[in-house]
Image (spheres, grey):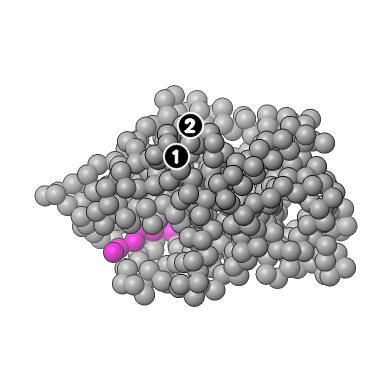
Amino acid sequence: MTLLEANQIGWGASGRTGGQVIPGLKYDPDELETVLGADLGPRVIAATGSVGDEVFGLIARHGIDCDPVHRGWLQPAFSARTLALALQRCEQWARRGAPVRAIDRAEMADLIGSDHYLGGWEDRRAGNLQPLSYVRGLATAAKRAGADIYVRSPAISVRRNNNRWTLTTPNGVVTADVVLIGTNGYTDGLWPGLARTVVPMMSFQAATPPLPAELGANILREGHSVSDTRRLLWYYRRDAQGRLVMGGRAPFREDPGPADVVHLRSAVDRLYPQLASVPFEYYWAGRVAMTKDSLPHLNELAPGLWAGLGFNGRGVGMATLFGRLLAELALGARPADIPFPVTAMRPIPGYPFTRIVARALVRYYRVRDSFEAA
Ligand SMILES: Cc1cc2nc3c(=O)[nH]c(=O)nc-3n(C[C@H](O)[C@H](O)[C@H](O)COP(=O)(O)OP(=O)(O)OC[C@H]3O[C@@H](n4cnc5c(N)ncnc54)[C@H](O)[C@@H]3O)c2cc1C
């Protein structure tokens, strides 16, 4: 196997994420079953619900040193409307036997260390990790298994010659029976139209220094990661050094400056007033890839050429799952045996307009969230 990476291992979103491993998709299980039908629906729900086992299983199997924490995820509600939706989501997973439970306002305040929320639910299948160490660990495991990895090697073209694929890079050529494309929010013009199937949006992160016990002891004391129910969600966790790592969405800007994390500062101030005098030590951003149907896409682009992308901000678990599904397709599995729809690529009609609307929506959602906050 040969891996071509345009930059460095983990340079894309995977090295920059909030590191939250969250089971499930944007659709709740009942809705997914209605959309995908009685055969495929339950298989997709089972596969996407078990991404925690997938990720933490790989970490254990390959001994990846990435601070894994498998102690669950909280989705706290910031408004009465979204509390009802969160509890409904919890009930649907509980009916399918998942280790989830509703959490009332007092217990949520205790687990998060903030009384900002009205309650919500907990999913014990979830967890978090140090994302760049995870990606590097996966690359090391792949190398150990015999993969050749080339960094600073963008694939510039992919063409079919004599029933094989030929990929060119600035420094050489690779031929292959099967090609898998996993470029998500950084998809370029390698395969015509593919970049128009996803809308790249920016997600931002900022981290405090390690918190002293007198400030941090009550913050996420059981090791949960959190993504709340805002349209532009606040997502956060503690890292292995005791930092608070805070994340959120903001208008598109490739290289963020301090002004771009003001919204993260106000989130921290609102949740944890005791951290008012603790500045952010680091901030960064990267691209997530949104899709029109809010589902990731497993596309068959041509015989022996597949792409997996559009993780809608849930790629730590979902891209790991898709990695396995793409490998099974490469090894000859029939699309019908894959627990996810394998579809043709569908570029979004009126794409430039969609991108403009998506970016405007970020501002609009911020206003809606601030009016709706309890
Ligand atoms: C700030 C931030 C926080 C996030 N937090 C979370 C979270 O907590 N939980 C979660 O589940 N998800 C989160 N996400 C989303 C998640 O990170 C992504 O869904 C996931 O990393 C996508 O992985 P990927 O391997 O498909 O793409 P990426 O990790 O983005 O990698 C794509 C790679 O493709 C390379 N590339 C592009 N074109 C070419 C080419 N022609 N040839 C060779 N290489 C090419 C790029 O250099 C890049 O390295 C977050 C994203 C961001 C940006």
Is the C-beta of the residue carrying label 1 under 8 Å from the nearest atom of ligand 1?
Answer: no
Residue 99 screen position, x and y as percent: 62, 54
Q: CA distance from mark 1 to mark 2?
A: 7 Å
Residue in the picture at 37% in, 32% down: 346
Q: Amino acid at mark 2?
A: Thr
Is the C-beta of the residue carrying label 2 under 8 Å from the nearest atom of ligand 1?
Answer: no
Tell me where residue 146 sits by quadrant. Answer: bottom left
- According to the picture, the residue beneath numbered tag 2 turns out to be 34
Residue 253 screen position, x and y as percent: 60, 43
Q: Quadrant of the C terminus?
A: top right
Residue 309 screen position, x and y as percent: 43, 45
Image position of 119 (left or right of 231)? right
Residue 259 colored magenta?
A: no
Local SS, label 2: helix
Q: Quadrant of the N terminus?
A: bottom left
Residue 164 screen position, x and y as percent: 17, 52
- According to the picture, the residue beneath numbered tag 1 turns out to be 41
Residue in the picture at 48% in, 36% down: 33
Q: Amino acid at mark 1?
A: Gly
The residue segment tinted magenta is 1-7
Query: Dots 1 and 2: beta carbons under 8 Å?
Result: yes
Local SS, label 1: helix
> Which of the pair 39/279 is nearer the observer?
39
